[in-house]
Image (tube, rainbow, N blue to C red):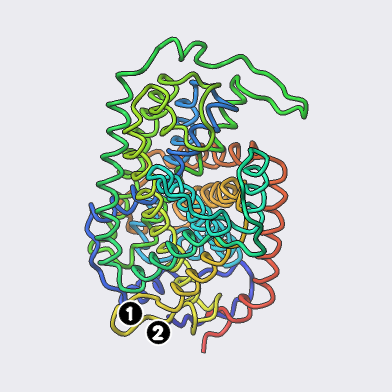
Amino acid sequence: METQVKTSDNSVWRKKPLAAYEQDMKKSELKRVLTRWGLTSLGIGAVIGGGIFVLTGIAAHDWAGPALALSFVLAGIACTFAALCYAEFASILPVEGSAYAYSYGTVGEIFAWFIGWNLILEYMMGATTVAVSWSGYFEKLLHLFHIDPPVWLMNDPVTAQEKAEALRAAGQVIPDFSFAVNLPAFLIVWLVTYILVKGIKEAASTNNLIVMLKVTAVIFVIIAGSFFVDITNWTPFIPEMVTDATGQKHYGFSGVVTAASIVFFAYIGFDAVSTQAGEAINPRKDVPFAIIASLIICTLLYILVSLVLTGMVRYDSLDLKAPVAQAFADVGLTWAVYIITIAAIAGLTSVMLVMMLGQTRIFLGMAKDGLLPRGLFAAIHPTFKTPWKSTIFVGFIVSIVAALTPIDKVSELCSSGTLLAFAMICAAVWLLRVREPNLERPYRTPALPVIATLGIVANLYLMYNLRTDTKIAFVIWGTLGIIVYFLYSRRHSNLNNPE
């Protein structure tokens, strides 16, 4: 049952009173079963996935060279500023909805809506991208066991035709087909959907098991790969800047920054911890801890993997599709390819799980406030105590798009929405500190004016360095969100209907 708040304010900047959040927490039907380390595991599960196994090759080969480690540092710093601000908000408002909920109580409705709209872009499209990546690694695993499924069953229609033409050009006999579907991507999405509908405890247990597996694999990559590092591959550490025919600058400091904006996708997910506040046992203390702990752990692992990878293989010789697995194959450790491929599949599964989990909780928070249809997005299952209709809806959209759509460059589009949301949350927590200085804050961001300013600047700077077509796509998405707000959300908002 949603909270009703009496107000005569019809402004798009109207705010949800903080007292209303307390009422929401008391009325919540979600199960509080997540511990401090359970939340941290969810954070690690969301962060470590395809990014570390895929984007490292592209970022080092095309943009940063061995200085990829610095790119991870830059992206990690930008995330840290946002994480510290997230942590303060999470301690004040431990409710589902993440940055959306925080902004609604501090800055205003349209600001909060726009953040929520961007989080939809982050989580739903992120989960779609991960599902397609999962399918690619699953196909690679089948090939390792000499199983060759038909092209039309493993790819979307466009990609299937492209692959078929390439294989025919290489001399292989590929039968003609009129229909193609990425069946593995479709099925893994529905498996994750089933787990999420069953309950948060089951989802968290599944995630914990996967996290242990993939963190072990990442540590294996670091330790085993370190024995094959050739330090001459790190020279020059920052390759001299070059400009291509389109005017795009590669390498040098600008290349390092561009690589940071690309690998930023590998960090997306630590904020998903804050979407689980409604299911945390002690959210005011444990959510801030989990946000910061998961980010620190993942950043250290990313830096070490990037150093090992560029030390094993010269940056301009890295494989773009499976850089980590190929690096081990190049040094003769072909058996390690099996471990890395399985770890990548496991890692991508947990990323998908946490992203879809976070998406449904964002929808739940927005629906409780009347900004989205309650019957679909706020319906809680009587037995499982999960937003089951919303979960099935997300699973349906993600599975169809992943099965039938060629997804490339979507990771950058997800990053654009997240970078803006991070910058906005840094501004919002600072604004709340000024407006409500006496509000109880179990966790206080240290040196907030400095941290918030650096967070805003760092995230907007990384966003500025994204490709032009990514920025154009983001503007289109944002415009669509504003249209939806004025056509539906503003009129149906609880603050617009106090009775």
Q: Is residue 438 left or right of residue 149?
A: left
Dot 1 falls on a residue whose secondary structure is: helix
Query: Does dot 2 land on a helix, a strand or a loop?
Result: loop
Instruction: Give residue 13's quadrant in the image.
Output: bottom right
Give coordinates of residue 366: x percent, y percent. 50, 71
The quarter of the displayed image where residue 281 is located: bottom left
Is 280 placed above or below 320 here? below
Whether residue 268 is situated above or below residue 334 in the rendered picture? below
Q: Which residue is mark 2?
A: 1
Whether residue 305 is visible to the viewer of this picture, yes or no, is yes
At 31% across and 44% down in the image, what residue appears? 214
Specify whether 469 is left or right of 284: right
| Residue at 57% from the left image edge and 29% from the top image edge | 257
Q: Nearer the viewer, residue 439 or 182?
A: 182
Label 2–label 1 contact, CB within 8 A: yes
Q: Is residue 237 above or below residue 368?
A: above
Left-right relation of 234 to 227: right
Count of numbered tags: 2
Residue type at numbered disc 2: Met
* Residue 294 position in % (x across, y down): 32, 45
Q: Residue furthest bottom?
A: 499
Q: Position of residue 34 (x, y in %)?
A: 25, 62
Residue identified by numbered label 1: 27
Which disc is residue 130 wearing?
none
**Residue at 47%, 36% in the rendered image:** 322
Whether residue 107 can be seen here: no
First in sequence: mark 2 vs mark 1: 2
- Mark 2 and mark 1: Cα distance apart in space: 7 Å
- Mark 2 Cα shell of 10 Å, populated few (<14), some (14-19), many (≥20): few
Residue 434: x and y in percent read 47, 52
Query: Residue shown at 27%/46% (left/top)?
Result: 213
